[in-house]
Amino acid sequence: MEKGGTFAVASGRQYSDILPYFGGLLPNAPLVQGNGTSIYDCREGRILFKLPLSIAYKRECIAFARENPWVWLVAGNEKTVMQVNFGDSRDAYTKALTDIRIDAEEFLRGEYLKLVYVVQTPEQITRLQRITDRFPSAPSVRKTLSSPVFLETYDKRASKANGIRLALEMAGLEEKTLVCIGDYYNDEAMLRIADIPACPANAPEDIQALCKIVTCGNNEGALADLMETLAQM
């Protein structure tokens, strides 16, 4: 940024979960949140764009979750993510995804941009993959695995790639060289539009095949590794 570059994050998370990692640094381009379901200008502190889910679709998702108590349902609004409680044993689920809880009725009333179905055990992962086609669906909804244990659903018009295109247009940055780094299948479209796509060494092989740069693993400083590589190009 000091040398005239532009930095932002395109994430499945929201700004309240993203910004604490940067120690007060505010990215100088809009954040693409929730896999492209919203765009946030952290300099001005406002949402520039969002694609909320319909009430009808949220009702279908609640019904599916009630029928499958081994699935945890996490909802994201424009600010953060929260777990939907159903009054059964899954409410005690403590995996580090969110500490914020809402009930099903509050989920129906609120404006939410994406849903994440979460499982925990290898057996549940197999079940999740096997019944993906039976998950609540609609012509306007996209479903994507963002990790072996997360199935995400959101407006079909949203993706990290579409969000980045729109954010670049909003910021007047279309002519910049676009460098993107991502590690899973929800990053695929984003990597395909990048001038320089990159991924960490622990990304799936077919994701690595899309990339011009493969860094160290994502727990070993992949972003720093990428920036050092770019500085030498």
Image (cartoon, rainbow, N blue to C red):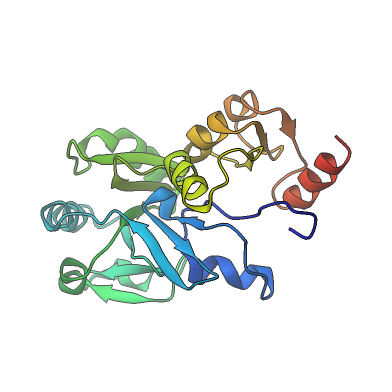
How many labels were placed on the picture?
0
Would residue 96 be visible to someone looking at this image?
no
The quarter of the rendered structure image containing the C terminus is: top right
Q: Residue at x 61, y 73 (%)?
A: 20
153 or 134: nearer the viewer: 153
Asked where in the image residue 59 lies, by quadrant, the reply is: bottom left
| Vertical placement of residue 11 versus 79, above or below | above
Viewer-closest of 145 and 29: 29
Residue 61 position, x and y percent, is 19, 53
- Residue 207 pos. (x, y %): 59, 29
Q: Residue furthest right?
A: 232
Image quarter of residue 7: bottom right
- Can you give x and y, in whole percent of width and height, for residue 152 in the image? 36, 47
Query: Is residue 179 left or right of 137 when viewed as pictured?
Result: right
> Is the residue 156 above or below the residue 224 in the image?
above
Image: 36 above or below 96? above
Residue 17: horizontal and vertical position, in percent?
Answer: 52, 68
- Going 47% across and 59% down the picture, which residue do you hit? 13
Residue at 63 percent of width and 68 percent of height: 26
Left or right of 201 in this view: 39: left
Residue at 58 percent across and 69 percent down: it is 19
Instruction: Name the image quarter holding the N terminus.
Output: bottom right
Q: On the picture, is 4 further left or further right than 78?
A: right
